[in-house]
Image (tube, grey):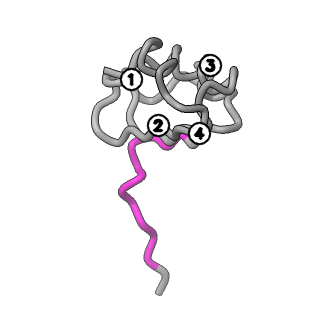
């Protein structure tokens, strides 16, 4: 659903968030869009294959928050 073309159609202030299904976003194209400034940021909790490989281009994007399918978890302090 969110591929290179869709990312290029977004405003440079766009923030992409995916907590639904990993394959909905082309993560290679997302990393390129983040690095080039085509979009502002991303928050991703699901990936095509989990866990996300440490060498994946998204791991090098300072403007991406990546969680390993745990964004739902909130720590409760006693």
Q: Which residue is mark 2?
A: 16
Neighbor class of circle 3 (other Cα within 10 Å; few <14, some 14-19, many 20+) is: some
Q: How far separated are the C-alphas under marks 1 and 4?
A: 18 Å
Is residue 29 shown in magenta?
no
Between label 2 and label 3, give the one nearer the viewer.
2
Percent of width and height locating residue 4: 47, 13
- Which label sits on residue 57? 3
> Would you say the residues marked 1 and 2 are in contact, meaning their CB atoms lie under 8 Å apart?
yes
Percent of width and height locating residue 55: 63, 18
Numbered disc total? 4
Q: Which residue is mark 4?
A: 13
Quadrant placement of the N terminus: top left
Asked which secondary structure carries label 2, the reply is strand
Is residue 68 shown in magenta?
yes
Neighbor class of circle 2 (other Cα within 10 Å; few <14, some 14-19, many 20+) is: some
Q: Depth check: 77 or 12 in front?
A: 12
- Which label sits on residue 25? 1
In which quadrant of the rendered view does residue 13 lie? top right
Q: Which residue shows up at 29% across the image and 32% down it?
A: 21
* Left or right: 42, with 21 as reference point: right
């Amino acid at each position: 659903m969110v591929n290179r073309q869709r990312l290029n159609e977004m405003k440079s202030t766009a923030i992409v968030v995916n907590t639904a299904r990993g394959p909905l976003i082309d993560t290679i194209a997302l990393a390129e869009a983040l690095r080039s400034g085509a979009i502002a940021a991303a928050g991703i909790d699901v990936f095509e294959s989990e866990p996300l490989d440490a060498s994946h281009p998204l791991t090098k994007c300072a403007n991406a928050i990546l969680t390993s399918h745990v964004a739902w978890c909130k720590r409760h302090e006693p």
